[in-house]
Image: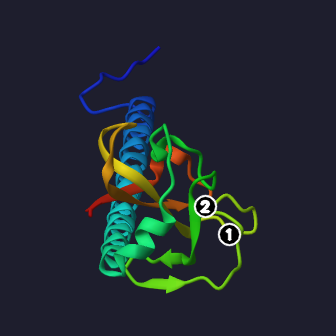
Amino acid sequence: MNRRKRTGGFTLLEVTVALTVMGVAMLGALMGMTAATKNVGEGQLRQYAAALAESYAQGVLLKDRRLIAQAAVDLTTSPDLEAIGAAPWKIDPQGLFEVHEDGVVTPVNLQAASCADAAIPAGTFCRETVVLNGVPFTGANAVSGIGRTVWVRVSRAGDPAHRAVVQREVVVQ
């Protein structure tokens, strides 16, 4: 039997295994890049939501402060621990909007009872507010009688409550 001498190079099996390993590695890298891109987009949307919450809170503070005092309620727990759409949070009448990836904000014309309303399309942002008596230090520990705290929460329909952006502004009277 005549056998050829192996003079170098790779067999077909070795090349196939090497290409398979490289393919799996490239697929993993592609999936990682896709996840990173999605996370960057989510972070940008959260920044837009935070900016909208802050600007709305500032707008509330610029209004007649007597209206803030009339809207204030007493609460023994921190409102950011309450579920989306639960009392004492109230949905803002113009509080439904979409934030596009380029930062453009468009209102959503829909009447909703709360930010937990099932009629709100997934991905739509919802803004709700509550005004509390007292000035909070941490959590629910508040100093009452010297002011009010305006809380604004922006959440996205379909997201868990811990992903909501909460902004609070203190009004000392």
Residue lying furthest top:
1
Camera-nearest residue between 152 and 76: 76
Please tell me whether mark 2 sits on a helix, a strand or a loop.
loop
Residue 157 horizontal side relative to residue 138, left or right: right
Q: Earlier in the sequence, mark 2 or mark 1?
A: 1
Camera-nearest residue between 56 and 20: 56
Please tell me whether mark 1 sits on a helix, a strand or a loop.
loop
Camera-nearest residue between 99 and 78: 78
Judge whether residue 100 can be spotted in this image. yes
The residue where tag 2 is placed is 157
The residue where tag 1 is placed is 121
Q: Amino acid at mark 1?
A: Pro
Tally of numbered tags:
2
Residue 105 place in picture, x, y as percent = 44, 82
Q: Is residue 56 above or below residue 27?
A: below
Q: Residue at x 68, y 69 (%)?
A: 121
Residue lying furthest right:
119
Which of the 4 image quadrants contains residue 115?
A: bottom right
Q: Is residue 20 above or below residue 111?
A: above
Residue 73 place in picture, x, y as percent = 51, 54
Describe the colour scheme in one phrase: rainbow
How crowded is the residue under tag 2: few (<14 C-alpha within 10 Å), some, or many (20+)?
many
Q: Do the residues under discs 2 and 1 have CB atoms within 8 angstroms?
A: yes
Which of the 4 image quadrants contains residue 22?
A: top left
Judge whether residue 37 can be spotted in this image. no
Q: Amino acid at mark 2?
A: Ala
Residue 97 place in picture, x, y as percent = 53, 77
Q: Is residue 50 above or below residue 22?
A: below
Residue 93 place in picture, x, y as percent = 59, 79
Camera-nearest residue between 39 and 77: 77
Spatial CA distance of label 2 from label 1 is 7 Å
Q: Residue at x 38, y 54 (%)?
A: 39
